[in-house]
Amino acid sequence: MPARVGRRTGPDTARAVLAVGAKAERDRGVARRFVVSVMLLFACPSLMAAFSRWGGALFPAYRSLSKTWIGLLSSLASVAPFALWDWLVVTLAVLSVIALVRCLRGRGRLLALISWIALAAALTLFSFVAGWALNHYAPPLAGELGLEVREYSADELATATEHYLTEAASLAPEVPRNDDGSLAEQDFYELAGIAGASYAGLAQSHPIFSGSTRPVKALLLFGEPLLYSGHTGIFWAPTGESGVPLNDPPADLPFVMCHEAAHRLGLASEQEANFAAYLACAASDDVRLRYSGAYNAFVYCWNALYNADGERAVQLLQDAAEGEAGEGVVLVWADRLATHEAYNAYEGTFEKVGTTVNDTYLKSFGESSGVRSYGLVVDLLIAWQLR
């Protein structure tokens, strides 16, 4: 009986087998990343639908979890005084382009690259929606503060406008100004620290304002593009960072910082974040914040009054300028004109695109007025003045 001759696998065959196995494992990895990406993307509208229908039953548990999560992210990101997310986005974009070039040159696998990009995008979107954006379905802030918001008469709007103008005019001469009367530039990072902690006092009486007190971040890379898109600040939920451009006009800067800090506390609605910013500014020991809050409250109310009755709005301003607070009123109006001029420099097509994108985003989370919700803060301001 002939002896069996054992067949030995040569080096080339072994390498081929290993290569086939490695390729199969890489293909499975690509498939897994695509599957996870699809699952995460599908989870976002599913969560939105669930909170839209049963949001009342899911709060305040979700808000507490969201505050804890965002607070943790904010603490981790506090290693730098500037926003980390914009640098991270640019870095990932550059790396993706480099990887794409390698793939096109045959030194990489295009499908694997796409799977990693899809996974990163899906994780970012899921973190945004599940970790913070569902706060859009929270109960109204007015109820938390015991305010009754209703339809208001023109007289009530005019009274509120005069109230906030008087408040702003009394503070206008106290804030730092240049020799020509214009607002002096302030240390951004000093204001960022004050604004970031501005809700600590309010939280003692209203727990809704509890949360991270980390400084607001400077947007070093995306600050200017953000202004050109028609926005003065942004809250980036995946890193828990409230960011503001360095070039926001001085009259608006403290208020915008407090607005973005309000988003970090789970106040997703734009009108509620604006109202919270006024409350935080009004409660501050820093006159720059108090003035910025009163100034913005006046501007919102005056704009609403002007749209309702332009002649009455102009007459109210003229009467105030001729009254006891005339000097302060003149300064307030000069600040408004300077602020308007500063924003005019950023107007253009990009602003229209940015506004459209933001409008679509707000409506997708139930803010049916879209970007017009920025002006609905007037109802809350009137309710606060009448309380």
Image (cartoon, rainbow, N blue to C red):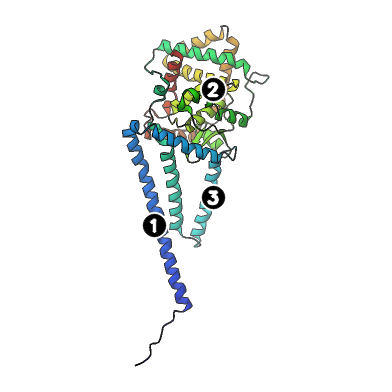
Which amino acid type corresponds to the residue marked 3 in the rendered image?
Val
Residue for point 33% across, 37% down = 50
Q: Label 3: how many residues lie within 10 Å, few (<14), some (14-19) or many (20+)? A: few
**Residue beneath label 1, please?**
31
Mark 1: secondary structure: helix
Residue 255 versus residue 344: which sits nearer the camera?
255
Q: Measure the alpha-carbon separation of dots 1 and 2.
A: 51 Å
Q: Nearer the viewer, mark 1 or mark 2?
A: 2
The three-letter amino acid code for the residue at tag 2 is Cys
Q: Amino acid at mark 1?
A: Ala
Q: Can you say which quadrant of the picture contains the N terminus?
A: bottom left
Label 3: state its secondary structure: helix
Q: Position of residue 292 (x, y in %)?
A: 55, 22
Q: Position of residue 29 (x, y in %)?
A: 42, 58
Q: Would residue 292 be found to the left or right of residue 307 on screen?
A: right
The image quadrant where one finds the C terminus is top left
Q: Earlier in the sequence, mark 3 or mark 1?
A: 1
Give the foreground label among 3 and 1: 1
What separation in Å lies between label 2 and label 3 (alpha carbons)? 39 Å
- The residue identified by callout 3 is 94
Q: Which residue is mark 2?
A: 281
**Which quarter of the figure has residue 223?**
top right
- Return the residue found at the far top: 323
The answer to which image quadrant residue 355 occupies is top left
